[in-house]
Image (cartoon, rainbow, N blue to C red):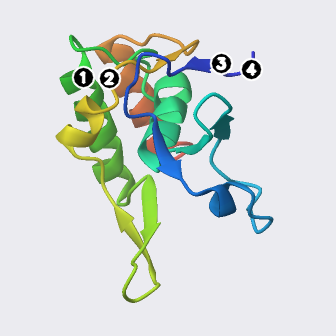
Amino acid sequence: MALTWDVTENVNAYREISYNEFNSENRSIFALPRYADNATGNCYEMTTECNMLIYLLGVTIGIPELTTENWERVYNRVHFMEVANGGSFLVRQNPKTKEVEAYNFTKEMIWNNVGIKTNGITLSSKQFKTKLANAMIGDLEL
């Protein structure tokens, strides 16, 4: 089943970009979704945080929608996965050094993306923990 998503209720899903940036031909195959609003002439690109949360909600953490009621649970699962994996799901380029830096999700980032909906599966807390334990242990003989 293909991952589908809806961010129409997430007011922070996109950031405004310039017309030149919108039409740039130097786009990666991993480029973020973009659109041009013909009524206003403005161009927009999905934020990195929103794009990654779509994947995490839809495929990884077992909570398919980000709401005002579950945002802390979403944060806890994402944070746990970042700690368990020893890394981050997010990277950005430092504007001063031009180096790529990893950064973790914050509670504020999760809250600012309330409204994302996916067709992902729902996992109970126990199912989520079991999924992670199996992924971490794999075929190790303990």
- Residue furthest right in the image: 25
Q: How many marks?
A: 4
Using the numbered discs, state the Cα–Cα distance from disc 4 to disc 2 in whole angstroms: 22 Å
Using the numbered discs, state the Cα–Cα distance from disc 4 to disc 3 in whole angstroms: 6 Å
From the image, tell me which residue sits under label 3. Answer: 4
Using the numbered discs, state the Cα–Cα distance from disc 1 to disc 4 in whole angstroms: 24 Å
Dots 1, 2 in contact, CB < 8 A: yes
Dots 3, 1 in contact, CB < 8 A: no
From the image, tell me which residue sits under label 2. Answer: 114
Dot 3 or dot 1: first in sequence order is 3
Dots 4, 3 in contact, CB < 8 A: yes
From the image, tell me which residue sits under label 4. Answer: 2
Dots 4, 2 in contact, CB < 8 A: no
Dot 4 or dot 2: first in sequence order is 4
Is residue 25 rendered to the left or right of residue 87? right
The N terminus - image quarter: top right
Local packing at callout 1 (Cα closer than 10 Å; few below 14, some 14-19, many 20+) is: many
Q: Residue at x 45, y 10 (%)?
A: 122
